[in-house]
Image (tube, helix red, strand yellow):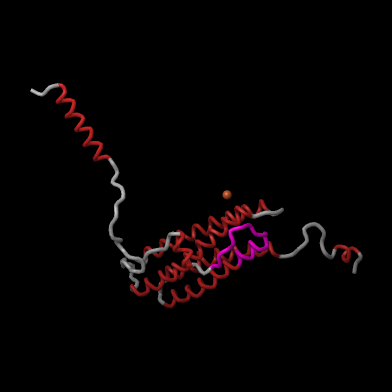
Amino acid sequence: MATKADKRSASYRQIESGTERAKPILHQNAREIQPYGKIAKLPIALDEKVCAASAENLNQVLADTMTLRDLYKKHHWQVAGHTFYQLHLLFDKHHDEQDELVDVIAERIQLLGAISLAMAADIAETTIIPRPPRGREEVPVQLSRLLEAHEIILKEARTMAAQADEAEDDGTNDLLVSNVIRSNELQVWFLAEHLVDVPVVHADNAKAAASGR
Ligand SMILES: [Fe+2]
C-alpha cells in the first residue's frame, strides 16, 4: 500500500512533468525555408521571371522608402526654430504615410513570391539615399535633404512603373503610380512651399505699392 510520502512524491513528479511541458522551447535554429533572392511562386498568373524582376525593383524602393521614413522621424525630433511646431507635426504625418507605403510595398514583394528586406542593416546597405549626419541641422537643410530623397524615389519609381507596365505586372505598376508616386509628389509640394522666400510680416513692395509706383 502506498504511503503518504509516496503519494506526495508522485504528485510532485506530476507537477514537475507538467511544468516541463509548459516551458517554452528556446534557442531554436533551423535552415531558412526560403533563401533571400529565390521565388516561391504563387498562383497569380504572372511569370516567375516577371515576379523576380518586380520584386528586385520593389526591394530597392522599399529600402529607400524606409530610409526616407526614418529621415522624417529624425527631423521630427531634431527640428528647431520658429516653425518648430508646424514642422514637428508635418514631419510626423509624412513619416506615418511613408510607413504605410513601406507595408504595402513589402507585402507586394511577399505576394510576388519573393522576400522583402526588413532589417536596418540590410536597408543601410541597399538604399541610395545619402546618409545624413547624426547631429541636428537647420530647417532649410532638413527640407532640402528630404526633397532630394523624395526625388530619388520618384525617379526610380517612374522607371520601375514603366518596366512593370512593359512586363504586364499591373499590380506593381499600380502600386508604384497610385501609392508611391502620388504620395511622394504630394509630400514634395508640402515641403517645397516652405522654401519659397516670401516675407512673413512686411511685404517687400509695400512702400512702392502705397506710393503708386
Ligand atoms: Fe513624436
Rendered location of residue 78, percent (x, y): 62, 54
Identify the residue shown where x is 24% and y is 39%. Answer: 20
Observer-nearest of 165 and 151: 151
Question: 152 left or right of 27?
Answer: right
Furthest residue toward left: 1
Rendered location of residue 60, percent (x, y): 46, 68
Position of the N terminus, as image quadrant, is: top left
State whether residue 56 is above or below residue 71. below
Q: Quadrant of residue 5?
A: top left
What segment is highlighted magenta in the picture? 129-147
Observer-nearest of 12 and 93: 12
Rendered location of residue 209, percent (x, y): 87, 65
Observer-nearest of 72 and 2: 2
Identify the residue shown where x is 51% and y is 72%. Answer: 156
Q: Quadrant of residue 142?
A: bottom right
Counting labels gives 0
Furthest residue toward right: 211
Position of the C terminus, as image quadrant, is: bottom right
State whether residue 28 is above or below residue 10. below
Identify the residue shown where x is 70% and y is 54%. Answer: 81
Rendered location of residue 12, percent (x, y): 21, 30
Question: 152 left or right of 56?
Answer: right
182 drawn magenta: no
Identify the residue shown where x is 56% and y is 55%. Answer: 73
Furthest residue toward bottom: 166
146 drawn magenta: yes
